[in-house]
Amino acid sequence: MSNEEQQQPNPAAQAPEGAVTEGAAPEFNPAVLLKQLEEAQAQAQEHFDKALRTQAEMENLRKRTARDVENARKFALEKFAGELLAVRDSLEMGLDAARGETDVEKIREGTELTLKMLAQVMEKFGVEAVDPQGQRFDPDRHQAMSMQPNAELEPNTVMAVLQKGYLLNDRLLRPAMVVVSKAPEGE
């Protein structure tokens, strides 16, 4: 044997049992291959079924979410409107009572009670009045209807509130309509 032959390893001697070596024909066992194919097909079917179920669940979730959003939008004011019904009832009763009533004091008292009831409902739902009398003009919360010279007040101070503004949970619903002071012309 030559030196080259001794240094070359024998591939058949080093290959693990059942492994295909170069030049050797692979051994095919039809029963083993058929079993592997069946297992792969079963696993593929299982994955396909899971994917279908997941897709169906996602579609159901999308539909349910859309329905919930629509219901939330549709019935968002349900509690508020329900509370306002008592105020409306009170106003209607006041009008009915005022038809034959000549005592203005009773009518005023009924109106004040109704206004108080309305204020309670509004407060319950986070509606807050903005009455900036004497405060510095804030263009984010006030709408200046006019400016009047006034030497007693600093410029840009709210002199009069023509119509209150309202906030809903600290978000402006309507700005207060105000008259704002300005420095007199001669100063």
Image: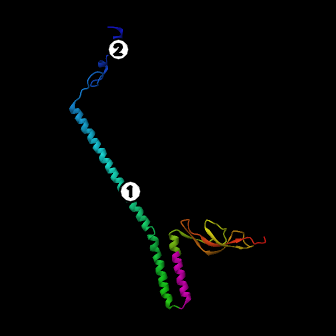
In the rendered image, residue 28, in percent from the top left (x then y), is placed at: 23, 29
Residue drawn at (47%, 84%) of the image: 93
Q: Looking at the picture, does residue 112 appear above or below residue 61?
A: below
Distance of mark 1 from mark 2, alpha carbons? 67 Å
Location of the C terminus (image quadrant): bottom right
Position of 106 with respect to 134 (left or right) is left
Q: Amino acid at mark 1?
A: Arg
Q: Residue furthest top?
A: 1
Which residue position is annotated with label 2?
8
In magenta, the rendered stretch is 102-118
Q: Looking at the picture, does residue 15 appear above or below residue 79?
A: above
Would you call the spot at circle 2 few (<14 residues within 10 Å), some (14-19), or many (20 or more)?
few
Secondary structure category for the residue under label 2 = loop
Which residue position is annotated with label 1?
62
Location of the N terminus (image quadrant): top left
Secondary structure category for the residue under label 1 = helix
Position of 70 with respect to 126 (left or right) is left
User: Which disc is residue 40 wearing?
Assistant: none
Q: Residue furthest left?
A: 31
Specify the principal SS of the magenta part. helix
Residue drawn at (49%, 88%) of the image: 97
Q: Is residue 111 magenta?
A: yes
Where on the picture, by quarter, is residue 4? Answer: top left
Residue drawn at (35%, 14%) of the image: 8
In the rendered image, residue 29, in percent from the top left (x then y), is placed at: 22, 30
Q: Looking at the picture, does residue 163 appear above or below residue 138?
A: below
Contact, mark 1 vs mark 2 (Cβ under 8 Å): no
Q: Amino acid at mark 2?
A: Gln
